[in-house]
Amino acid sequence: MKRWAYIGLLSCFSCSYFTPEAKPEAVARVNDSYLYKDDLKNLVPKGTTAADSVLIVRNFIDRWAAQKLLIDRAEVNLGDEQKAEFDALIRQYKVDLYTKAYLEQIVKQTVDTVVSEAALQEYYKANKENFRTSGSLVRLRYLRLDKDNPRYETIKSKFFDYRKSDKKFWDTYALQSKGFAFNDSVWVEMNQVYAKLPFINPDNRDQYIVSGKSTQHSDSLETYLVKVRAVIDKNQVAPYEYLKPTLKEVLLNKRKLELIKKFEKEITDDAIKDKDYEVYQ
């Protein structure tokens, strides 16, 4: 090692090396800072070979030494004004970290996470103009089949004349397909459509993504059946069902912020009452 760091490695890095002792032993020193045996506890995973154990420990010690040397150099070479600025940032970070964790704990214990359907719909009606689509939304169903499926005509007929009474039929044949989605009451974004139906792309989407349009498309291996139920274009008011999860998060965040504001006021009022908080004129 270089003259500025004395590294005192123990002679053996077996499991017994990491056994805690009543009096910690220093294994390395950089100037006035020491690294102790207890600092290396649980560093090496169980089952690690002796050679790998030595390498892991040595690398850790070297990194520790480099950091200590850098901070010592920084203390000497950085200006007082810059160090004071960094120290203020560190103090503020601690304040932010502690208060954030504490408030999250209060919120978790206090906020009612149940949002009623009525509350969601009321908020949507009052604010729906603020929720416009950033891209097109689509409701559709699709089915991917092998091109030579022997029951293709029957499957196609039932797909385009979709009925809930055909559930047993689809329980059999949908699972034999190469991909399907029958829940056409759910709004999806176009990137999901492109991923599931690769023959549709931004250049030809207007050919296929039209409300009420039925499509059967074949390539060399597969046939796609697609039925589009509805389309909402970009910059239109997003439908309630699509927004519902977002609306719930918005309302829950509002509750959290209101609780935090209330809690901060109460804790300040209590401190004033108990004379723990005073403002001097």
Image: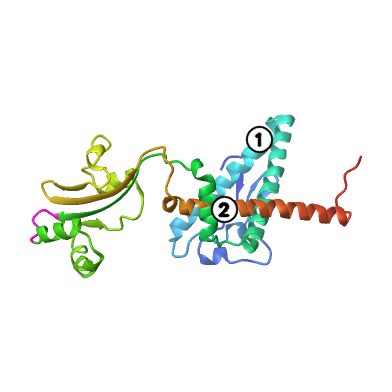
Q: Which mark is residue 251?
A: 2
Spot occupied by residue 94 in the image (x, y as percentages of width and height): 69, 48
Question: Residue 246 versus residue 74: which sits nearer the camera?
Answer: 246
- Quarter of the image for residue 173 reads bottom left
Q: Which mark is residue 73?
A: 1
Spot occupied by residue 19 in the image (x, y as percentages of width and height): 58, 67
List the single residue furthest toward the bottom: 168
Q: Assign the C terminus to one quadrant of the image.
A: top right
- Quarter of the image for residue 165 reads bottom left
What secondary structure is marked by label 2? helix
Residue 129 shown left or right of residue 80 in the figure? left
Main secondary structure along the magenta-highlighted residues: loop
Residue 60 higher or lower than 72, as above or below: below
Q: Which segment did they paint magenta?
A: 146-150
Residue 33 shown left or right of residue 252 in the figure? right
Residue 83: in magenta span: no
**Residue under the image location 70 percent in, 48 percent down:** 95
The numbered mark, 1 or 2, whose residue comes first in the sequence reads 1
Q: Assign the N terminus to one quadrant of the image.
A: top right
Q: Label 1: few (<14), some or many (≥20) within 10 Å?
A: few
Q: Label 2: few (<14), some or many (≥20) within 10 Å?
A: some
User: What amino acid type should be assigned to the residue bearing mark 1?
Assistant: Arg
Q: Which mark is residue 227?
A: none
**Residue under the image location 36 percent in, 50 percent down:** 187
User: What amino acid type should be assigned to the residue bearing mark 2?
Assistant: Leu
**Residue under the image location 67 percent in, 59 percent down:** 106
Residue 236 seen in the figure: yes
What secondary structure is marked by label 1? helix
Spot occupied by residue 104 in the image (x, y as percentages of width and height): 63, 56
- Contact between labelled residues 2 and 1, with CB atoms less than 8 Å apart: no
Q: How many marks?
A: 2
